Image (cartoon, rainbow, N blue to C red):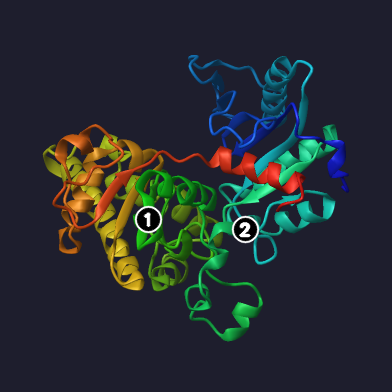
Amino acid sequence: MSVARDRYPTRGALILVLNCGSSSIKFALFDAGQSPLPRAPVWNGKVQGIGGPVPTYGETGIAPKPLALDPQHPYRAALQRIRAGVLTRLGDRRLHAIAHRVVHGGSKYFDPVCVDAQVLADLKSYIPLAPLHQPFALEAIEILLDERPDLPQVACFDTGFHHTIPMVEQILPLPYDAWRRGLRRYGFHGLSYAYLSTVLPERHGEVARGRTVIAHLGSGASLCAMRELRSVATTMGFSALDGLMMGTRTGALDPGALIYLMQIEKLSLEQVGHLLYHDSGLLGVSGLSSEPRVIVKHEADEGEVGERARIALALYVRRIVREIGALAAVLGGLDLLVFTAGVGEHNAFIRERVCRDLAFLGADLDAAANEADATVISSPASRVLVGVEPTNEEWIAARDAVAFANGRP
């Protein structure tokens, strides 16, 4: 689809951002008529439980309500509900473009791109690299391409921010031909890290341009080492399975364990994939939940329940601490550590345990500030500035879509 950019002037226009998951769609509408683009959306919300028994639709500030969706085409029906909400807010204004968070751009796409049939086909080939996310964003794009071929759709890639990491961090210790075929460390959560690279110098000044590690801790989790606000190393790799232990994903794992599961225990490739993505991590070890805040409540329990809760939390924290230490070694020290995303922003317990084990780097928390999820949670005596910063992936996608449409990709 070739779109003349001057047909979609920014003045008075709005940008719709869609962040699509397997069972949910986050949506946000930004005022593209203002410069700079406001960071707060004019309207946003979420459809949850798509494909489940009781899907819900909720807008920020309004309690979610049950939503009836066509069981044969639930994703299309959810998008139609969002579109109805957009239309009620447009009035006489123009929808400038739709920006999509797309997890994987492979070795071909790093900058935002306007999606046409060829781009869509390329992105579909990367579904095996991010099966929890990629197919759902592409389903939304395909539906909207069919319904509104006149409306530009801009794909913004989670892998793009890490395009700056050096080759020694990208290359995998496989035969060199694997590099030529595109098997490499890509890194993810790039829209989140891009937002932090924008807001941290505003918040913390020059220290943000130094040796910085950002901990994006949510259901998926990764770390990014930055210098001069650019990614130089990250924990996720070829796929979103690598690195830290996550809610239901393993993180880094001895590949010999996978060979054993398939060769000795006779698990199929499909069974191993499901195990790695859905049945492992905090949920798999604890047997309780993928959420640290739930597991913490059982840490003092007696018997196997309490023991597994304690092991799961200890392993979760240990993997974070180990990887922060590794990134600090790559950076040659640590000046700034920032927690973001659901767990990072709201779980004082995890932050305290991580920073307690990082005392060797000079990290020291202010307990009251940590409990309050304050912007700065380190004490005056800490040699490392430790902060908490809400992420804003949707704004980054909207900003990139505006820049792309104005000829500044």
Comparing labels 1 and 2, the label whose residue is closer to the camera? 1
Identified by mark 1, the residue type is Glu
Tell me where residue 48 appears, x and y as whole percent: 54, 27
Tell me where residue 353 appears, x and y as whole percent: 19, 49
Quadrant of the image occupied by residue 72: top right
Residue behind mark 2? 128
- For mark 2, give the secondary structure: helix
Residue behind mark 1? 206
Quadrant of the image occupied by residue 179: bottom right
Q: Nearer the viewer, residue 68 or 184?
A: 184
- For mark 1, give the secondary structure: helix
Disc number for residue 3: none
Placement of 212 over or under 307, stated as above or below: below
Q: Nearer the viewer, residue 93 or 174?
A: 93
State how many labels appear: 2
Tell me where residue 389 appears, x and y as whole percent: 38, 41
Tell me where residue 21 appears, x and y as whole percent: 57, 40
Q: How far apart are labels 1 and 2 at the CA level?
A: 40 Å
Structural crowding at the residue carrying mark 1, measured as other residues with C-alpha within 10 Å and reported as few (<14), some (14–19) or many (≥20):
few
Q: Nearer the viewer, residue 86 or 125?
A: 86
Residue 136 seen anywhere in this rendered image of the structure: no
